[in-house]
Amino acid sequence: MIKFVSLNRRRLLAGIGGMALGITSLSAQAQEPGPLRLGVLTDMSSLYADVTGPGSLLAAKMAVEDFQASPHKMTRPIEVISGDHMNKADLAANIAREWIDRNNVDAIIDTPNSAVALAVRNVVQQNNKTLLVSGASSSDLTGKACSPNLVHWTYDTYALSSGATRAVVGSGGKTWFTLTADYAFGHAMEADIKTVVQKLGGKVVGGVRTPINTQDFSSFLLQAQASKAEVIALINAGGDTINSIKQSVEFGIPQGQRVVATVLYLSDVHSLGLKVAQGLQFTESFYWDLNDDTRAWAKRFAPRNNGRYPTALQAGVYGATLHYLKAVDALGASSDGKAVVQEMKKLPTDDPLFGKGSIRADGRKLHNMYLFEVKKPEESKYPWDYYKLIKTIPPSEAWRSLEEGGCDFLKS
């Protein structure tokens, strides 16, 4: 009996010892960081799919490839996943929440559509992850909706409105009518344009709000035409910009009034054609044919994107993702959201698409902006040769000041 107990005790102790070793092994495995997961949350199927979409996913993958090909210390594997928010803020927030809860996603990237970005921002901050905004443009993202977990990389409504508006008012366009997409981006851009126009001695004489992703702009354009304003500002993007420009040409509006596209992408010009788009002036942060570095990267990108050259938003995904990976690496592969964003702000930015720059305390990425004009058909010499540079706008002129933005978390 005693021997039986003793034997079983020995077996029990041996079993406990084996269990302890197993638990120790599992604990060690649990402490090892899993893959660094990046989620590209973008528009894969609607009006921003050409300017972001699959091209943004490709840009993020290229950033990972280029980071892994460079000297670095990080041994964690890196995974990139993607989701389609369909321009619905509630859907985007649900995807972000599921990614974080179930897939351990560390950073969410792109988020075209400002309402989407603002909704995802809340989820990311609550879970201490990182949001890298390229596609959304509302200046509120570094103003009243700023976050210590967010970097706004490519552009914003202030920078877009400032360059083009100054150029147009300076050339005589004093009275304006605004045709505005009725959501967060449009509202922010409209406010920024009104501020700049008034500062320069001009006047906004009227405006109309339009539904997002609409096919018929005729009634809105007729109101703009009837206003007799010298300038009709199209405050929309993607497919809405394409449709409103085409219909303004059909109505003969450019003959009597000046149509200004406040947001214009390379893919928009490609869809419109130079015959329709020629002469449009606009502000942008990137053009594939700007210098040797942008050309080299674009020629790597295009063959993997069905021959389509990169937009500024896709370039922004690449630049933001590459800098994020550098910051994670500098922190020893940490994916603590606030810590990584703080490190991104400490490290000078430097990539082949945007050159040298920095990230300000409110999360605003600072780099040059450019005033471009769409070429005439006879001026284009090769495929996707669409822009001519009118002016380089330095960061000190391009971006709203930190004080004007009023970022709340910097006050605490």
Image (cartoon, rainbow, N blue to C red):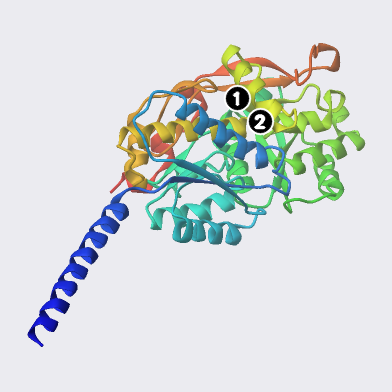
Position of residue 408 relative to residue 229, above or below, is below
Query: Is residue 381 in sight in this rendering?
Result: yes
Going by the image, does 272 lie left or right of 29? right
Crowd around label 2: few <14 · some 14–19 · many ≥20 (10 Å): many
Going by the image, does 109 lie left or right of 387? left
* Amino acid marked by disc 2: Thr
Q: In what element is the residue under mark 2?
A: loop
Q: Which residue is at the front of the view, 89 or 195?
A: 89
Q: Which residue is mark 1?
A: 286
* Amino acid marked by disc 1: Phe
Q: Which residue is at the front of the view, 225 or 32?
A: 32
Q: CA distance from mark 1 to mark 2?
A: 8 Å
Q: Which residue is mark 2?
A: 311
Image quadrant in which you'd find residue 396: top left
Residue 341 horizontal/vertical position (percent) = 37, 40
Q: In what element is the residue under mark 1?
A: loop
* Cβ atoms under marks 1 and 2 closer than 8 Å: yes
Quadrant occupied by the N terminus:
bottom left
Image quadrant in which you'd find residue 313: top right
What residue do we see at 56% from left, 47% from top? 81
Position of residue 102 relative to residue 166, above or below, is below
